[in-house]
Amino acid sequence: MRQTCVQPLFLHQPSHQHWHILGAGAIGCLWGGQMIKSGLSITLLVKPERGASLPTRPKVIIHDHQGISNFPVTVETTRDKTPISHLIVTTKAGDTLAAIKSVQSRLTENAIIVLLQNGLGSQQAVADAFSHHAVFAGSTTDGVWLKNLLSIHRTGRGQTWLGPLNEAASSSFHGSAVHTLLTIQDMEVFLTKNILYKLQEKLAINSAINGLTALIDRPNGDLLKPELQRTVSRLCRDTEAILASDGYSNNTPLLEMVNRVLTITATNVSSSLQDVRKGRPTELPWINGYLLTLAEKNGVSASAHQELMQTLAEKGIR
């Protein structure tokens, strides 16, 4: 397999614009590697215990259909003191608020925060806690999984939508540094003023896939089997009703959207199943769990999601 040590292509960017990426998992490494390739200045932030296990000259390694690419990268731990003016957060949803608070003292007065988490709920918690900062959220469909520390396998090229999550972000939207992220090579990044819609759309699809694949311990395509389509359909009906009670609507039936994703990603392993196989907590509390909270708030039935989450809990999957 071809291996390449990639030299960055230097694009125009303000000399003061340096990005820190908090979370060196699959998405963090993908963004870090592609940003370096695009000539953007970045530093990966890791926990102190992870930093101690890194080589002297760390590299982000990306495996894809073209071969293997290596990107020399600067790494700091969360205990370092370098100021942070542009922060991308790629931690798991349940870790996000605490992770940002661990570097809060390093944030500059006008620092912007970009969140890339699954589900809903964690983003709003950050927007509330850091209301004086411009907080943006993103929804991505890139397919990637972590092989080893700083080494990832990219299974598919998706799209990422970014948009303002609070007033500080909305008021600075047109002149914001997030526009720089549109220049990242080999990634499709778009801006929207209505990021909540994109987050709801992805949550809706994930709510019918992630928990069920984690339960049966099988790749996405198995959910297309007739014996599982009945459960997928029930989850979709519940989700459509719950999100409709919160003002969300889509002209395409959710089951059709889900089955299209299942077909395209048939051999992929969902992020929740990856978590289960590695003994980690999943993001399901911010996907199906979020829907259950919303259903209770708005008085909508959520029996399919209740049954799924209860069965997962009985198997020790949370």
Image (cartoon, grey):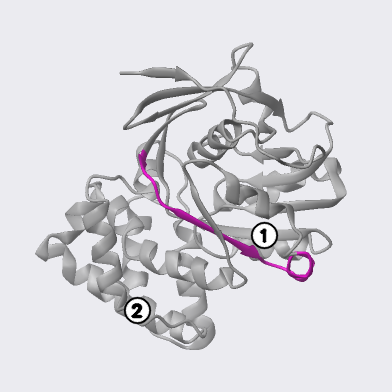
Q: Is residue 127 magenta?
A: no
Identify the residue at horizontal 72%, vertical 63% (top origin). Answer: 127
Q: Is residue 29 depicted above or below 248 in this figure?
A: above
Q: How far apart are marks 1 and 2 (CA)?
A: 29 Å
Residue 136's disc is: 1
Q: Is residue 103 depicted above or below 135 in this figure?
A: above
Relative depth, front residue between 276 and 163 = 163
Q: Is residue 153 depicted above or below 166 in this figure?
A: above
Q: What's under tag 1, amino acid-wise?
A: Phe
Instruction: Determine which quarter of the picture holds residue 310.
Output: bottom left
Identify the residue at horizontal 45%, vertical 55% (top origin). Answer: 159
| Residue 90 shows in this picture | no
Residue 248 position within the rendered picture, expressed as x and y whole percent measured from the top left: 48, 81
Residue 120 position within the rendered picture, expressed as x and y whole percent measured from the top left: 54, 65
Please name which of the two marks, 1 or 2, marks the residue nearer to the observer.
1
Is disc 2 surrounded by few (<14), some (14 to 19) or many (20+) residues within 10 Å? many
Residue at numbered disc 2: 238
| Secondary structure state at the residue bearing disc 1 | strand
- Magenta stretch, residue numbers: 155-172
